Image: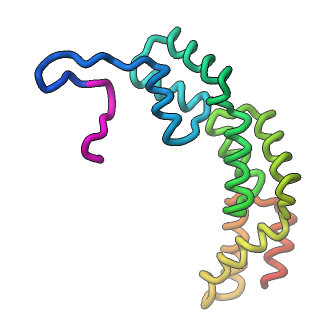
């Protein structure tokens, strides 16, 4: 733990007096200055601090109205990072976003927008990931290396036909 940072509900001051508790909106703003959150993740953080449910709902609604909390823009930023920078598969990105509480329709829209805007090439993406993994498999029996590469790409959510083509290309 970092010195000086507080975790959990506020503690009484050293002199025994109670510190005023920050509002859920103030706490949410503090969280959002550090990084982006989904609605679900921010709600979970506010619930952990034991704020009343009606205040949590009002805070989330207020942040959504102001544009500070937006699942659609979160999904697009997340997708751009995963597809462009990490060469993740579209299926894997979709799984991660749904796990974070993003609605399926927002996920599909975000992936489509990023693929169009960034001109993401699925074939180049899987080939890049496969070449990197193949370097770690040198020295193995070629059959075993192909099996491991195939399984690795399947676990990453790439399409079966793309995996077959890429493994054949690198074999």
| Quarter occupied by residue 135 | bottom right
Q: Nearer the viewer, residue 60 or 82?
A: 60
Residue occupying the far top of the picture? 54
Relative to 158, residue 139 above or below: below
| Quarter occupied by residue 143 | bottom right
Point 73% across, 60% down: residue = 84
71 lies left or right of 59: right
Residue 69 position, x and y percent, is 63, 29
Point 52% across, 16% down: residue = 56
90 lies left or right of 119: left
Relative to 113, residue 31 above or below: above
169 lies left or right of 41: right
Q: Which span is picked out in magenta? A: 1-10
Residue 119 position, x and y percent, is 86, 59
Task: Count how many numbered circles sit on residues in the image.
Answer: 0
Relative to 64, residue 1 above or below: below
What scheme was used to colour the molecule?
A: rainbow
Tell whether position 81 is magenta. Answer: no
Point 88% across, 52% down: residue = 116
Q: Quadrant of the C terminus?
A: bottom right
Residue 128 position, x and y percent, is 74, 73
Residue 134 position, x and y percent, is 67, 80
């Amino acid at each position: 733990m970092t010195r000086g940072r507080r975790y959990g509900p506020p503690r009484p001051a050293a002199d025994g007096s109670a510190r005023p508790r920050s509002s859920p909106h103030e706490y949410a703003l503090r969280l959002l200055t550090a990084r982006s959150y989904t609605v679900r993740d921010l709600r979970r953080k506010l619930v952990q601090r034991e704020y009343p449910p009606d205040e949590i709902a009002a805070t989330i609604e207020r942040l959504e109205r102001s544009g500070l909390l937006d699942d659609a823009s979160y999904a697009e930023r997340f997708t751009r990072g995963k597809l462009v920078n990490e060469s993740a598969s579209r299926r894997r990105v979709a799984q991660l976003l749904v796990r974070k509480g993003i609605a399926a329709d927002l996920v599909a829209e975000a992936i489509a927008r990023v693929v169009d805007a960034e001109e993401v090439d699925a074939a180049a993406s899987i080939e890049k990931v496969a070449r990197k993994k193949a370097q770690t498999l040198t020295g193995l029996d070629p059959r075993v290396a192909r099996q491991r590469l195939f399984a690795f790409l399947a676990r990453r959510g790439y399409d079966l036909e793309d995996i077959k083509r890429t493994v054949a290309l690198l074999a």
